[in-house]
Amino acid sequence: MTDRFCVALSGDFKRADGTLTYPDFDLAPLRVARGVEMAFIDSVSPIRADQLKDFDALILLSHRFAPESVPKGGCLGLVARFGVGYDTVDVDACTKAGIALVITPDGVRRPVAVSIITLMLALTGKLLTKDRLTREAAAGFARRSDHMGVGLVGRTLASLGIGNIGAELFRLAKPFDMKFIAHDPYADRSVAAELGIDLVSLADAFRRADILSVSVPLSPATHHLVNAERLALMKPTAYLINTARGPIVDQKELTRALQEHRIAGAGLDVLEEEPPDPTDPILKLDNVILAPHALCWTDQCFAGNGAADVKAVLDFQHGRVPTGVVNCAVLESEAWKRRLAENRRRFAE
Ligand SMILES: NC(=O)c1ccc[n+]([C@@H]2O[C@H](COP(=O)([O-])OP(=O)(O)OC[C@H]3O[C@@H](n4cnc5c(N)ncnc54)[C@H](O)[C@@H]3O)[C@@H](O)[C@H]2O)c1
């Protein structure tokens, strides 16, 4: 056992020319931390076990962490994903090997909630339409009264899901004086009460919303949660916003609803197929605002994800359970408890 604590960064944190992929990810706290040595491993996906055999922790961008990535008999005890999606990580393999997987809800909460507000304001304010009118000069100005926006006071903001991001949306939307409703079968009722959100049935969320935002995880239960039948419940003046995952919305049915003006419009940061097929009809519609699964990508979002991962790594180094653990069962495993106790002995101040 050495007094070095070795942290690997997946190779995709560096570009081919050796510069950092995301310079807003501040690595200084790791560089100066007592006992910590960090290294970028070669850019390989899935990551190979031999690349990780000397490391205590891995900070992982987009590369896959598969069963064959687990170093046999190694000291790896933490995989810290940069972001909240972890479909690239074999969670069972981590749990079996006593490796905790953490994600960074603190990093994305505000940036994604801001992107929902951005889409809500752009849709109801007809921002893109008015941008196009202006570029047509006099001809566009002449048509501006045909494109009234929609005021928000007293209108109903609905969210499917009031977890990390859904709840933050309502926190940010407070000054707009809207009515708040949400559907979330597992909602923390104290959060709903504190934010003045009425919890309603799924059908009521679709029926009553003027703006309906989707903030649920993608799972077999939420695949095509927004389908033809439920879209048909929406008001013709209502807007749908999806910043969660594309397949939660049946995109063919949404496209049809938008083409037939059965709803007023949609704001989508995520699509069923990413990147989309260039012939996808949704790309031709002018009542939809699209973003390439990157509307929340800001300097602060990337700095926040990085800071959360660094904190998780340093917590683990000092024998503390990090926040944001996905595979909570690992916390009961002997392998994890042993690693944590060893780290506490080696590094606790
Ligand atoms: N666009 C982006 O770049 C981006 C970035 C981060 C997260 N996301 C996505 O945003 C979504 C929300 O993330 P989060 O951090 O708030 O997750 P979270 O787990 O904190 O919250 C999700 C909420 O959805 C609820 N829920 C689960 N099943 C439901 C159902 N069938 N109906 C209604 N509610 C249900 C849960 O009870 C929970 O409260 C996820 O899909 C995530 O992948 C997107």
Image (cartoon, rainbow, N blue to C red):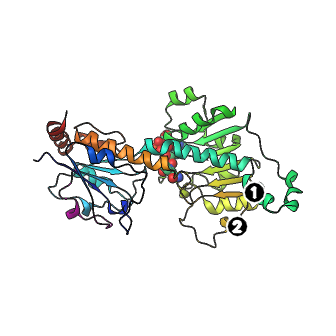
Q: Is residue 27 left or right of residue 166?
A: left
Mark 1 crowdedness (10 Å alpha carbons): few <14, some 14-19, many ≥20: few
Residue type beneath disc 1: Asp
**Residue lying at the far left of the rendered structure:** 1
Q: Nearer the viewer, mark 1 or mark 2?
A: 1
**Nearer to the camera, 282 or 62:** 62
Which residue is drawn at the image coordinates 34% and 55% (left, top)?
60
Q: Read off the residue under disc 1.
A: 131
From this view, report whether residue 229 is shown above or below residue 342: below
Q: Nearer the viewer, residue 61 or 86?
A: 61
Q: Check disc 2 and report the residue beneath it.
A: 284
Q: Residue 7's mark?
A: none
Q: Which residues are magenta?
A: 41-56
Name which quarter of the figure residue 117 lies in: top right
Q: Earlier in the sequence, mark 1 or mark 2?
A: 1
Q: Measured from the top left, where is residue 130 in percent x and y?
A: 77, 54
Residue situated in front as seen by the camera: 308 or 23 = 23
| Residue 294 falls left or right of residue 35 | right
Q: Residue 234, can we see it?
A: no
